[in-house]
Image: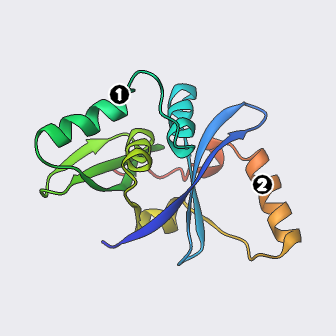
């Protein structure tokens, strides 16, 4: 199992259902990984990506402060797999511990702590979408695809336990 570093593109809204999608992008190989998230999680992701600091700490800042109080910090996060349509993630601390997390929380923490986000390479190939070349027409087609995609488009019909 190898991991590929990804860029957090941001949160997009899938239409017509108005469902937020966390969009991650790998450059080598060139793939996008869309992960459907809730509205509250999308808001937290957007705040973290913009680097905003609310007047009172959010839960993500509290967790990072707690790690610091225990003399460690967040090293990176990894989107590790999925169970059906539910994506799974892990937080990795600098002292070698792994903590299970929702991908939306993991990525929000990574943005807040300014640490890398990785995706398991097999998961990226299985659940990702090949990124188009920088050709403007293809980029427009891909944006159109993202505007019209739904969670059901990624169901394989084969689930393993």
| Residue at figure coordinates x 40%, y 62% from the top left | 118
Residue 81, horizontal then vertical, whole percent: 37, 54
**Dot 1 lies on which element?**
helix
Alpha-carbon span between mark 2 and mark 1: 34 Å
Which label is found at residue 145? Answer: 2
Give x and y (percent) for residue 112.
41, 44
Q: Is residue 80 above or below residue 137?
A: above
Q: Residues within 10 Å of mark 1 (few under 14, many from 20)?
A: few
Residue that label 1 marks: 59
Residue under the point 38% across and 26% down:
57
Image coords of residue 101 (percent x, y): 31, 41
Which residue is outermost to the right? 137
Q: Which mark is residue 81?
A: none
Of residues 104 and 130, the one drawn nearer to the viewer in this rendering:
104
Residue at image location 54% in from the left, 77% down from the top:
29
Residue at 60% of width from left, 48% of height from top?
10
Q: In the picture shown, does residue 52 fall above or below 144?
A: above
Q: Is residue 24 above or below residue 17?
A: below
Q: Position of residue 17 (x, y in %)?
A: 73, 30
């Amino acid at each position: 199992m190898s991991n590929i570093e990804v860029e957090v593109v941001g949160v997009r809204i899938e239409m017509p259902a108005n469902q937020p999608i966390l969009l991650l992008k790998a450059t080598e190989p060139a793939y996008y990984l869309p992960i459907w998230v809730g509205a509250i999680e999308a808001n937290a992701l957007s705040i973290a990506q913009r680097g905003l600091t609310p007047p009172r700490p959010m839960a993500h800042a509290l967790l990072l402060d707690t790690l610091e109080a225990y003399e460690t910090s967040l090293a990176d996060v990894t989107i590790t797999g999925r169970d059906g349509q539910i994506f799974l993630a892990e937080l990795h601390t600098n002292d070698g511990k792994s903590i299970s997390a929702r991908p939306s929380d993991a990525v929000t923490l990574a943005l807040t702590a300014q640490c890398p986000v990785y995706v398991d390479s097999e998961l990226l190939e299985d659940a990702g979408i090949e990124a188009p070349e920088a050709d403007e027409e293809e980029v427009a087609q891909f944006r159109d695809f993202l505007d019209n995609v739904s969670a059901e488009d990624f169901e394989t019909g084969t689930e393993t336990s």
